[in-house]
Structures are given as C-alpha cells and as structure tokens.
C-alpha cells in the first residue's frame, strides 16, 4: 500500500501534465532560414497564408514560429517579455489569434540563457522561466523552441564547452514552467546536442531535440548532420524526435536532387519537418513538389515513429544503405549516393535480411515489382533512392564469429580500456588511442567465402560543433586491410551519446581466404588523425 500523499502526487502530476508529445514528428514553418533574426508580423503572415494557399497545411505543416528577433530589448515593469512593436505592431496575442484563425498553431521562441541568440541585447528566459511561460500561454502559444545562447554571460553568444550550456538543468526548468501554465505546449529543445546523453535526457522532457549545430546553406551540412543523427534511434519513439534542423528545401541553395536527398533523409530519420523557404509566388515548383510529396511525408509521419538506421556504408565508393521499420510490417530502404557523380551500386537484399519484397520507388512514384537477391541500382549524383517494401519475406540469418578488439594484437601504443558495466558493449572493453602508426590486428579470423560483411563495433563521440559550418563531419576514419592487402578507408559516424556507447558500422570486405582461422585483418588510423575506438568485429558468412 502506498501512502496517500504519494498517490495524490501521482494524480496531480498526471492531471496537470501540459506538455504535448506529438505522436509523429512536428511539421511547420519557421522564419530563421529565410529571414535570419529579422522576423516581422508581415513576414509571418505572408508565410502562414502561403502554407494555406499552397495546401501545405493540409499535408501537416501547421506550426508557424517567429524565431529569434521577435521581442523588444527590455522586459516591462512586471518583467514580462515584450514584442518588438516596430516589427510586430499588433503584438503576440493578435498574431496567435491570426494563426489560429487560419487553423494553424503558434510557435514561440526563446532561450535558456541571459540573452537571445543572434542579438547582443534581446533578453533570454534565464531566471524568468515562469513569467515567460505564462506570457507564451497568454499569447496563445502552442509550442516553444528553446535555444541555448549566452549560457555563461551576456557577452559570449555561443559557449558550447561550458557546463551551463551542456547541462540539462535549464531545459528541465523551462519544462517545469510550461507544465505549470494552463495551455498545452509542444516543447522543442534546441540545445545543439552538446555534452553527453542529450538524446536520453532531452527525449524525456522535449517533443524534439536539436542534435546538431545549425544547418548551413551548403550540401556538406547534410553529410555532417546525417552522421550526427545516427545514434539517436535509441531515443526516437512516438513523442520524441531528433531534430536535424529546419529544411533548406525552397531556399535555392541545393540542387533539386539534393533537396530530395535532404528531405528524404530527414523524413526517414523522423526529424521534424520545418520549412524555411519563403512561401510566395517565387517558390520553385520543384521545391514545392518535394516538400509536398505525400509518400515521403507519410514515411516521416508513420505511426511506428522509428528512426531508420545506417546499415551499410561504402566510404570510398561514397554510398550508404539505410533501413527503417514502418507500420504494417513494412520497411523503408534509403540508398544514398554521396558522390558528386552518378553511379550504379549493388544492393544485396538478402544481406539486409530480406529474401523478397514488393518494392515501391517513392520519389519515382512507381511500383517496381517483387525483388529479391542483388539489385543493381542506378543513382544520380546526390540522389537518395527511397524504396518502401511490403510483403516482406525474411532471409535466413548468416552465422557469425565475434572477435574482441581487446584480445587482438595491438601495436604502436593503442590502449585497452575496461568499461563500466553496460558500456562498450558487447565486449565491455575497448581499444582507444588508435593514432599515428598504431594498429589493431585480428589474427586467425575464419571466413566462409572471399567476401564478407563485417559488423565493426566502434565508439566515436567526436562531435562537430565549432567546426560545423566549416568541414566538421562527425566522422572519424579507420582503415581495414585484409591479409596484407591495401588499406581501405571507412568513415565512422557518431556511435552513441558518450565515449562508451557502441555503434555498429557494417562494411563489406574482400580478399579473405576460405577456412578456419586463416585470415588477418588490420585496423589503423588515417594520417595523423585519431581513429574511432574499437570494441570488436563480427564476421558474417
Ligand atoms: C541557433 C539555433 C537556430 C536559430 C538561431 C537564431 O542557436 O540553433 O535554429 O534559432 O540560433 O540565432
């Protein structure tokens, strides 16, 4: 029997729960990508009307958010945030009413620090969380994007190494404040994925969490954010979605093929779909068709809410295979061509566990028929082919042997770490410091044919933040050489949420000798840069 007070507490907390966890990723439009920190009433209204006129609201895009720059430089005499009346002459309540009148939702924006991002004067919510949550509610807000600037002072906008910026505490505080107001809010955490275990804590309190630094108007930021989202499948579920940032579709900064790739990659990873382009008559018809593609949106909005996983990477050949589960025993396969040229790739369905399936090519809007075995797939430069699979029959699983890195032959100074219980799985140990001239050699590896799929269990938490708009990619390279053959490079994405959570990259190796214990496989870093840590390898065959 529980004490009455505890029972009461339980009742009170569930009765007053105000945060809304949407069952599928939120969709909408936000001012930032097109207007930076210069939103206005007129710009918000134009784009809100655009959502309606273009039929985008009917497809699910319904949250409209004025991002940074909406508020005045000072609070009022009761410490309430005030709208910038030059930019928003009618104020917050009127804007909320206007959006609601169009059948849309009103997204608010603030931050967990002293000042707002993109400004040296506009206040953030630190210390005023309760007052601000009440204001957001009084204006009719339906969601809050909560940013992470000026965490330590009023002078440093981005202090991404500080304990304050990495800590969940300020984001938790605002969640408590939102819970206390009399209006449901979707809470969009914009902490940028810095520090450790962000997916774990943020998925508990937020509807979405930004897991990267900002998207940048260039193709390379698609590679960077994609490599960073990989580990978050563990936290993604109905009500909890990794936010890969607002879409570049419609901003005229990517080619049409790249826009399809970007939109499709965000969709299969269950990212929110927040438009950033200006929704007026100048919007390209191609971009409109991409953001309006019902089948791709349906993948994103699938009721299972499972993030796709990176299941194969061919680094030198520059392509990946992604596989995700959909409701109704369906799956989605994404075949991603990172190469700047077209190429034809071979996809062995059986090695993905699929004996046969009926395939729909989503972007081509064509039924391909029933496929089995190895498929040759022609991909345009920067194309993401999306297949939805139904009527799937499962291929028999291959046998495998596991080799722990800690038991391999180490040369040149790499070191073994014994990890805490539950870490560095499955071995519980990892080999780290794989740097210049260091090698990890697995001897006596058994193979059943000359080629094999190898699941490489690795750890990489070298996330790109300060290098994000430059060439930071969230990958670390490692080479694999088989039986004295040439060392081939593989790019490992982030593996988990700290330096102890293992990820797996499945690669295909060649040059094996058939037989028990007859092979040697050598792992090494590239140049003078650290490789990821290595936990072990599972050789299939
Ligand atoms: C960043 C945030 C962006 C945008 C920007 C405004 O911190 O990640 O999405 O809101 O601030 O300056």
Image: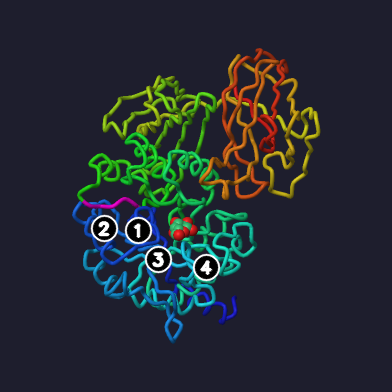
Q: Which residues are magenta?
A: 275-280
Mark 1 sits on what residue? 31
Is disc 3's CB within 8 Å of ligand 1?
Answer: yes
Q: Position of residue 95 (x, y in %)?
A: 28, 70
Quarter of the view holding residue 104: bottom left
The reply to whether residue 389 is visible in this rendering is no
Mark 2 or mark 3, earlier in chain: 2
Q: Check disc 3: other Cα within 10 Å, few if <14, some if 14-19, many if 20+.
A: many
Q: Position of residue 268 (x, y in %)?
A: 41, 42
Q: Marks 2 and 4, Cα distance to the nearest angstrom?
A: 27 Å
Q: Marks 1 and 2, Cα distance to the nearest angstrom?
A: 9 Å
Mark 4 or mark 1, earlier in chain: 1
The chosen color scheme is rainbow
- Is the C-beta separation of discs 1 and 2 under 8 Å? yes
Q: Depth check: 489 or 155 in front?
A: 155
Name which residue lies at 64% across and 49% down: 498
Mark 4 sits on what residue? 112
Quarter of the view holding residue 297: top left
Mark 1 or mark 2, earlier in chain: 1
Disc 1 is placed on an element classified as loop
Question: For the stretch drawn in magenta, what is the main secondary structure?
Answer: loop
Mark 2 sits on what residue? 47
**Residue 75 within the magenta-colored segment of the rendering:** no
């Amino acid at each position: 029997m529980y004490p009455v007070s505890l029972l009461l507490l339980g009742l009170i907390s569930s009765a007053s729960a105000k945060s809304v966890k949407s069952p599928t990723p939120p969709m909408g439009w936000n001012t930032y990508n097109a207007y930076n920190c210069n939103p206005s009433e007129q710009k918000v209204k134009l784009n809100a009307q655009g959502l309606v006129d273009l039929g985008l609201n009917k497809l699910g895009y319904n949250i409209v958010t004025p991002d940074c720059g909406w508020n005045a430089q000072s609070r009022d005499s009761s410490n309430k945030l005030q709208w910038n009346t030059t930019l928003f002459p009618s104020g917050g309540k009127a804007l909320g009413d206007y959006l609601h009148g169009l059948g849309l939702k009103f997204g608010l924006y603030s931050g967990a620090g002293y000042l707002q991002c993109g400004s040296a004067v506009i206040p953030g919510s630190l210390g005023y969380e309760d007052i601000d949550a009440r204001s957001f509610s009084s204006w009719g807000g339906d969601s809050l994007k909560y940013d992470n600037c000026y965490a330590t002072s009023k002078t440093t906008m981005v202090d991404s190494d500080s304990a304050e910026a990495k800590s969940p505490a300020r984001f938790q505080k605002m969640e408590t404040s939102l819970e206390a107001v009399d209006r449901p809010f979707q809470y969009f955490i914009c902490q940028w994925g810095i520090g450790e275990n962000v997916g774990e804590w943020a998925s508990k309190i937020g509807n979405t969490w930004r897991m990267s630094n900002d998207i940048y108007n260039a193709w390379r930021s698609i590679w960077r954010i994609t490599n960073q989202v990989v580990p978050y499948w563990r936290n993604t579920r109905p009500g909890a979605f990794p936010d890969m940032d607002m879409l570049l579709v419609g901003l005229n900064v990517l080619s049409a093929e790249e826009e399809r790739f970007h939109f499709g990659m965000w969709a299969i990873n269950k990212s929110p779909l927040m438009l950033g382009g200006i929704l007026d008559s100048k919007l390209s018809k191609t971009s409109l068709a991409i953001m309006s593609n019902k089948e791709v949106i349906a993948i994103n909005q699938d009721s299972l809410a499972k993030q796709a996983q990176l299941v194969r990477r061919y680094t030198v050949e520059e392509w990946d295979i992604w596989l995700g589960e959909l409701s109704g025993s369906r799956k989605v396969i994404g075949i991603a061509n990172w190469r700047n040229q077209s190429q034809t790739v071979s996809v062995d369905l059986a090695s993905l566990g699929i004996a046969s399936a009926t395939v729909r090519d989503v972007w081509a809007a064509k039924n391909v028929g029933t496929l089995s075995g190895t498929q040759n797939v022609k991909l345009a430069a920067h194309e993401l082919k999306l297949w939805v699979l139904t009527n799937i029959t499962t291929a028999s699983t291959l046998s495998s042997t596991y080799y722990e890195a800690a038991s391999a032959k180490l040369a040149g100074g790499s070191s073994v770490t014994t990890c805490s219980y539950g870490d560095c799985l499955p071995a519980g140990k990892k080999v780290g410091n794989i740097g210049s001239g260091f090698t990890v050699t697995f001897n006596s590896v058994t193979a059943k044919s000359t080629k094999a799929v190898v699941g490489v269990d690795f750890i990489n938490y070298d996330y790109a933040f300060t290098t994000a708009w430059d060439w930071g990619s969230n990958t670390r390279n490692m080479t694999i050489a088989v039986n004295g053959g040439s060392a081939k490079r593989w790019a490992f994405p982030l593996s988990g949420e700290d330096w102890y959570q293992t990820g797996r990259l499945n690669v295909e190796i060649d040059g094996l000798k058939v037989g028990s214990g007859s092979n040697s496989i050598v792992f090494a870093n590239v140049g003078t840069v650290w490789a990821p840590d290595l936990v072990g390898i599972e050789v299939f065959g």
